[in-house]
Image: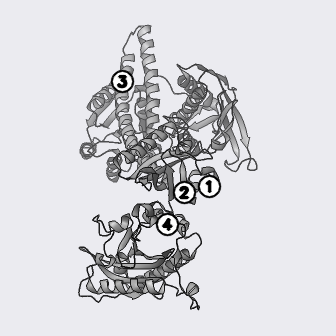
Amino acid sequence: MMTDNEPRDFRPLEESVESPPNIQGTNTRTETIDLESLPVEALTPSGSFDLRAVETTSLGKLLQALPIPAFLVDRRLNIIFANHAGRNIDGEPKKVQGSPFPSLFGNTFVVKMIQSVLEKVFSSRKPEVHAAVLQIGNSQLWGRMHFRSLRLKEYRSVLVLVEDLTLEKKQLLLTQKHQEELKKEIIDRTRTEEELRKSEEKYRTIIETIQDGYYEVDMAGNLTFFNDVMCEITGYLGPELKSMSYREFMDEENASKTSEAFNRVLRTEKPNKAFDHDITRKDGTKRNLTISISLIRDSLGQPSGFRGICRDITERKRAEEQLLRIEKLESLGVLAGGIAHDFNNILTSILGNISLAKMAPKLPDTICGRLGEAEKAVARARDLTQQLLTFSRGGAPIKRTVSIGELVKDCCEFAARGSNVRCEFSVPDDIHALEVDVGQIGQVISNLIINADHAMPEGGVIHVRVENVAVTEEESLSLTSGRYVKLSIQDQGVGIPAKILSKIFDPYFTTKQKGSGLGLATAHSIVKSHGGLITVESEMGVGTTFHICLPASEKAIGQQKKPDKGVVPGEGKILLMDDEEPLRHLVREMLSMWGYDVDVAKDGEEAFDLYCSAKDSGSPYTAVILDLTVPGGMGGRETIRRLTKIDPGIKAIVSSGYSNDPVMSNYKSYGFSGVVGKPYSAEELSRILDFVIKGA
């Protein structure tokens, strides 16, 4: 803030204003704007301007649209016109018409200088630009004032524009470097303003220099005036946009919202500074806009239309929506992972109790059958929790050798269940085996079947074909050469438009009103993590086919050893750590039935203490089973790290409902000898425990 003791530097900015050429003759040596277009009726009988008449002229409209104070001053130095910014120059609205212009400024020195400059401009008719410390009411600012002679017939006045340069002045005082940069900016800006003033289209150019769209509409909503930016925003050429109604590039909902906004401004007579709505450009694309709305009045003071600024905020809104979507997905992912973990613990209890029930002697065949069906239902539920985990955290796939034909049929039939589509399969008997994460690949297949179902609302047939293929380096840049299994899923649906076909694997891209845009993006990620490739081809009105290529396993399906049915009895001392008390009791009961001596711990701290005590007493544990995640306590990862320090030869099995955790897929790298994902059956746990104890 400048003080009253500072020198009042009120001087012409010679370096910022080009002086007019010194040519003999009154008409050539002066620079006066002739306002021949201003009607004579704008003059009152006393010889002053009629304010309402001026406001309806092109000059009046232009001055009212300017964001800086603008004044017209007569020879008596009285204000005959002030725009909105001028009447609010110190932030307090006031009636200034008819008052002496110099009286706006409280400093005596500045008042005298302004009087001198005004008299000089009236006399010489040459433009003047001056800077000074201006005292306006209780406010003090560093201002730059532009003085320009105007003439209507024989009546003369001076146009005064006032720029607030306070912030720029403060920056000039902060550093010399900034001072030089700002000085150059002031010089360039002043030179540009001078050139604009000399331009034949001086009034229109001011509107065109703003980066936002400027518009005016009549009371019916038809465009009457606009700048080129409005053409860029809407996609229409100027002659096309002229007289178009705003309703022509809006749907009914947005047109209704905009109409309500116009009516609100008309009713309240208060401007609407920021109103958001959507438009459809000429090329059919959607854009999000924010506009300001203010009322236009005619010469009689009656509403004649609306004007305002229009800004395209499409990219900003997309960025905000994407950020919000990411935040929601992250929160949902954490929730999904937690639900899957807890659900897997519950399923483990269910599956374990089913296993124990099946081991009861002399069970009726009907009971055994129902227990078997219950086991299948738990397996399907396990696949659903695996999908939740894949969505929530991703992670490396946990692969095992499978027959793709059996997996494809099970997933397709399950996904199509309850719909009006059916699947037809073509799966030869000699299909190569695959090393895949069954849950993740099953999720991919299920998503594709569900998409195919949605593409055929009237029903139809989904053709599913599996075949062996060989890929050479010349044939594909996306796959390494070798043997692959190709899965093709073909629907008879509406097809995918060519213009969006390349975008369907992009995250968050969807054509469904309630779609998340994650289905195909997740499928692409899963297939890629398996070293494979997913592609699509589609024809409108004919259908869509997705192709998935996965690398074949070196193991032949016929060579795979099928696990024996039933539990494997054993002996030894087992330490079980799990935070779920029901699971601890269930697994201890199962292990005890198989011949093991079992101790349990609720967390890693307790497990470590028990292991150390057993080792010191000369009765060490044969193996340990550690739960990977213990909320609020030490989990399996930290526990095995501490145990391997005191016993490098420890035989440990990691177990978790978070089957996507990298420890589960790379358990040996963390010091474990085996892995069992929840939920697991009694047979599965007994086989893994037996395998680890006998020399994993």
Mark 3: which amino acid? Answer: Ile
Q: Label 2 neighbourhood size at 10 Å, few (<14), some (14-19), many (20+)?
A: many
Nearer-the-camera pick, 623 or 338:
338
Q: Position of residue 673 (x, y in %)?
A: 43, 43
Sequence order check, earlier mark of 4 and 1: 4
Residue matched to label 3: 350
Q: Viewed as shown, does residue 616 lie left or right of 471?
A: left
Q: Position of residue 571 (x, y in %)?
A: 36, 31
Mark 4: which amino acid? Answer: Val
Sequence order check, earlier mark of 2 and 4: 4
CA–CA distance between discs 2 and 1?
8 Å
Q: Kindly indicate the quadrant of the structure image that contains residue 633.
A: top left
Mark 1: which amino acid? Answer: Gly
Q: Could you say whether the residue bearing mark 4 is in a helix, strand or loop?
A: helix
Q: Could you say whether the residue bearing mark 3 is in a helix, strand or loop?
A: helix
Q: Are dots 2 and 1 in contact, CB under 8 Å?
A: yes
